Amino acid sequence: MSLKVAVVAGGDSAESAISRSSAHEVLLSLDERHVVELIELDDSLTKNITAFGPDVVFPVLHGPPGEDGTVQGYLEILGIPYVGSDVRGSALAMDKYVAKTLFRKSRLPVLEDLLVSVDDVDEASAAISERFGPSVVIKPLRQGSALGVTRLPDGGDMSEPIKRARRYGDTMLVEPYFEGKEVTAGVLDLEGEEKVVFPVTEIELADGEWYDFRNRYELGRSIHKIPADLPQHVLDDITNYASKAHECLGLRDLSRSDFLVSSTNEVVLLEVNTMPGMTPTSLYPDAARAAGLSFSDLMDKLVVNAANRAADVSHPPNV
């Protein structure tokens, strides 16, 4: 099936450069099988989409407004099928506090947290210290790619980390610091097919490093070990948690869940990404390849799936 696919990327989000990098890879992979056009998320979006007349939109967008349900709602209004989760699922996953509330309801392992939105930095620091002590992680409530995240394993002044997180919104999420391996599990959930969880991936970094923005996107800064070097029962647990997290947020098509695993094999779920990175250093494509699915086949499956879903809605079965 050959389709007209609009790959939407960029915009003015803090992750716009990563979005463009992901979109470039997606466009190259689809170009041999489909008619593809790259469209920037800007004031000309409606004009350019209308002029192209796509069968499917692939919103390769990271962070708000592309990953939080805003663009998804826009495409729903236009009546254009698109790859990825719908408005509700996207919005739920983007808000770390709301997502964790749902994870707890589903008995998924998450850390305690504190939602902080006070204007005074000293007051915010005092509230955090009173709840968790000095060893914490401070992160923006609605942002990806580890932007604005500060880890304080040994404590320290919280003023700058609070200010850093607030560059991405007035509200932040604070969690107690948890030492562990960083691992992920990607989900592929296509219409009419059994949901698949790709092999658990461990992120290997230089000593003293963590998976921050630089280590995510600079070549050679991290190694993806697939499967992760963990006991089989822990791998099975993580696979199960990724599937349940995807399900409890009502997601579809694809997602990637991020975890920490302690030296005693305690697992905690951090967050779920509804549009994982597709850059040359990204985790989701590597895990798909480890499962036997090439990047081009993966991208083809996603756009064909979105087109078929729209066709099914347009022609519901007789009741």
Image (cartoon, rainbow, N blue to C red):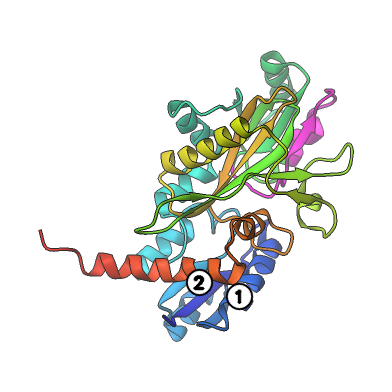
Residue at (49%, 39%) from the top-left corner? Answer: 245
Indicate whether residue 70 is drawn in magenta.
Answer: no
Q: Is residue 68 left or right of residue 24?
A: left
* Residue 220 picture location, percent across and down: 85, 57
The residue depicted at 54 percent of the width and 70 percent of the height is: 297
Extreme residue in the front direction: 232
Q: Amino acid at mark 2?
A: Asp
- For the residue pair 288 and 137, the one nearer the viewer reads as 288
Pick the quarter of the image with the N terminus. Answer: bottom left
Q: Position of residue 119 (x, y in %)?
A: 66, 31
- Quick one: SS at disc 1? helix
Give x and y (percent) for residue 122. Answer: 75, 23
Q: Which residue is mark 1?
A: 29
Residue lying at the far top in this picture: please name it.
130
Q: Which label is found at residue 265?
A: none
- Tell me: 153 left or right of 275: right
Give yes or no for contact between labels 1 and 2 (Cβ–Cβ under 8 Å): yes
Visible residue check, residue 206: yes
Q: Quadrant of residue 96?
A: top right
Residue 81 seen in the figure = no
- Among the 4 quarters of the image, the one containing residue 118: top right
On screen, residue 174 above or below 59? above
Q: Which residue is mark 2?
A: 300
- For image coordinates 80% across by 44% down, the residue present is 204
Please identify the quadrant where the C terminus is shown. bottom left
Q: Earlier in the sequence, mark 1 or mark 2?
A: 1
Magenta region: 142-164
Disc 1 residue type? Ser
